[in-house]
Image (cartoon, rainbow, N blue to C red):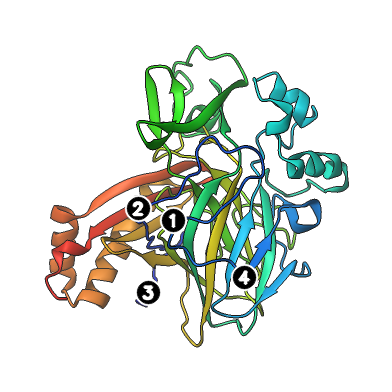
Amino acid sequence: MQLTFGGAAGTGVWVAIAFAGGASLAVLANQRAGAQTTAPGVAAPAEHLRSTPDNVVLGWFPIDRPPVLRVTSGSVVRIDTLSQRGTTQQEDPVTFLGQLGVEPDEVLQDVKDFWASRAERSREGRGGHIVTGPIYVEGAAPGDTLAVEVLDVETRVPYGINSTSATRGVFAPTYAGRPDDPLLDIPEGSVHLIRTGTADGRPVAFFSDAIHVPLNPFMGIMAVAPENPTVGQPGVTVAGVQGSNPPGPYGGNMDFKDLKAGATLYLPVFHPGALFYAGDPHGTQGDGEVSGNAIEQSLTGVFRFTVLKGKRIRAPRAEDATHYFLMGIDLDLDRAMRIAAYETVQFLVDEKGLTPAKALSLASIAVDFRIAEVVDGTQVVVGSIPKSLFLEP
């Protein structure tokens, strides 16, 4: 596990992130509700945090919620998460999902229990995600870094949901565009249940008889408690309540599909114990998440938490064996692109010893800039730097 620390600069609403991914996944195909194992070669979890009503919150990252689990640095924890799709609607889950073809025994008990508790949960200033936590990691203190190794990610049920609309995602009336842009011919609130399983020995989503999409399960949200949610910051409309929709320095709803099994995410610590949350589970997602959601599918993940004492970073970052990923996040897509490019240049200067001129040249000829997601208020652009460019061991 390697972590590099570079400076962050710039203005506006943004963070600079490098993500890690690329290790093989263990996706348990045709899994019935609640069935869970750990992939071969993955360290056995010492704790299992289940997504029961007492262990989850709806749509925000509390900074003063009592921890639902305490672990020591180096601990491996299994965390269950719930998709909000099929869980937070007005109709009870068995009825709602049954209309889409889900059998009653395929509905998680956690889903039914959460739905029964929904009336007790405030929605003021909050997003729609169900997040599990917080986990208190002993020894973590402000100014430290929390390393979160994603050891395994598995499906909990053999289906997920994607919804489409002519007026949501990148087609929302509030999205940048022109008033005369044509609307797609999509019925409002179209809901698509997508089965998952195996085909030809690989885990896939059965989009149709003729289209199989490879599964790539990952947590859309991994976060620590934010520093000081203040009205006016993205996603903060109520003092002290950081809504779950936009990502920030605390991590959160980053929705970057390479943050999967094999990734190590590094988060700056703002509060004692770090207070880690996970949620918004996805079976798979394309870069952009243009309809506003992915295959929203309840998952379980296995994570190792390590406190890096005295290692101070300003925003989330990570790496893997093949790439560095530098992320720009801003309310404006052009600004997000510029931030991602700036962070890429700064990384090459700080970590690889290039001059700014050489770094910008390399960024232009060898670095891919991808749109990760553009539907959570803040826009996300990722610079992907191949490690194979660098010949040192």
Q: Nearer the viewer, residue 320 or 212?
A: 212
Element at label 2? strand
Q: Residue at x 34, y 76 (%)?
A: 4
Say whether residue 356 is visible.
yes
Name the image quarter holding the N terminus: bottom left
Report the residue that reaches farthest toward the bottom: 310
Q: Earlier in the sequence, mark 3 or mark 4?
A: 3
Tag nearer the camera, 3 or 4? 4
The amino acid pointed to by label 3 is: Met
Which residue was labeled with disc 4? 46
Q: Residue at x 77, y 67 (%)?
A: 65
Say whether residue 238 is visible.
no
Tag 2: Cα neighbours inside 10 Å, few (<14), some, or many (≥20)? many
The amino acid pointed to by label 4 is: Ala
Name the image quarter holding the C terminus: bottom left
Label 1, label 4: how far apart the Cα atoms are: 18 Å
Q: Earlier in the sequence, mark 2 or mark 3?
A: 3
- Residue 261 got which mark? 1
Label 1, label 3: how far apart the Cα atoms are: 14 Å
Q: Nearer the viewer, residue 144 or 392?
A: 392
Q: Position of residue 366 (x, y in %)?
A: 16, 55
Q: Earlier in the sequence, mark 1 or mark 4?
A: 4
Q: Nearer the viewer, residue 311 or 136?
A: 136
Q: Position of residue 308 (x, y in %)?
A: 49, 82
The amino acid pointed to by label 2 is: Val
Which residue was labeled with disc 2? 382
Tag nearer the camera, 4 or 2? 4
Q: Quadrant of residue 88?
A: top right
Tag 1: Cα neighbours inside 10 Å, few (<14), some, or many (≥20)? many
Which residue was labeled with disc 3? 1
Tag nearer the camera, 2 or 3? 3
